[in-house]
Image (cartoon, rainbow, N blue to C red):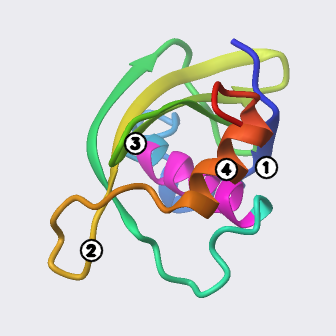
Amino acid sequence: MFFRFAADVPLRWVDIDSAGVVNNATYLSLIEQARLLYFQHLGLLTDHRVPYVLAETTVRFQRPGRLAMKVEVAVRVRSLGTTSFQMDYEVRAADEVLVTSSAALVFVGSDFKPVPIPPEWRQTIAQFEELPGA
C-alpha cells in the first residue's frame, strides 16, 4: 500500500506483555494516536474536538513487536462517503510490517447521529490523498 503520511509513535513499558511482545490491544492505541496526528498534520483538528467516531476496525497481526523497537504508523484515507470514510494503517518497525489495519469512521453531531462530512474536511483529505472530487 502507498501512504503519504507516517508518524513515529513510541512504545511504552506498559505496552509489553508477559511474553515480551507488544500486547495486541496496544496496536489500536498506536493507530488511534497516528490517526490524530494525521488529521493534525492536515490542519483539521485545531480545536481538539474529534468530530467522528470509530464504527468498525479490522486488525491483522503479522509479526510481533518488542520493547525498544522504533515504531511508526502509516495512515491514509482510502475513500470518502457521505457521512463516513475508510482508513488504512500499517504499523512498522524498521522495514517490517507488524500490523495492518482498516477502519470505518463516521462523522457525528452533538447527538452522536451521523452528519455529512464537512466540506473543508472532504476537500482537504481528497486533495492530500489525491482522491476523486479533489
Label 1 crowd bin: few (<14), some (14–19), many (20+), radius 10 Å: some
Q: Which residue is mark 4?
A: 123
Residue 117, image x, y percentages? 43, 55
**Mark 4, mark 2: which one is toward the viewer?**
4
Q: Which residue is mark 2?
A: 109
Q: Earlier in the sequence, mark 1 or mark 3?
A: 1
CA distance separating discs 2 and 1: 31 Å
Secondary structure beneath label 3: loop
Secondary structure beneath label 1: strand
CA distance separating discs 4 and 3: 45 Å
Q: Which residue is mark 1?
A: 8
**Mark 2, mark 1: which one is toward the viewer?**
2
Residue 3, image x, y percentages? 76, 26
**Mark 4, mark 3: which one is toward the viewer?**
4
Q: Is residue 90 visible?
A: yes
Query: Which quarter shows the N terminus?
Result: top right
**Boundaries of the magenta span:** 28-40
As shown in the figure, which amino acid type bears the numbered disc 2? Answer: Gly
Q: Are marks 2 and 1 in contact (CB under 8 Å)?
A: no
CA distance separating discs 1 and 4: 26 Å
Q: Which residue is mark 3?
A: 18
CA distance separating discs 1 and 3: 24 Å
Counting every numbered tag in the picture gives 4
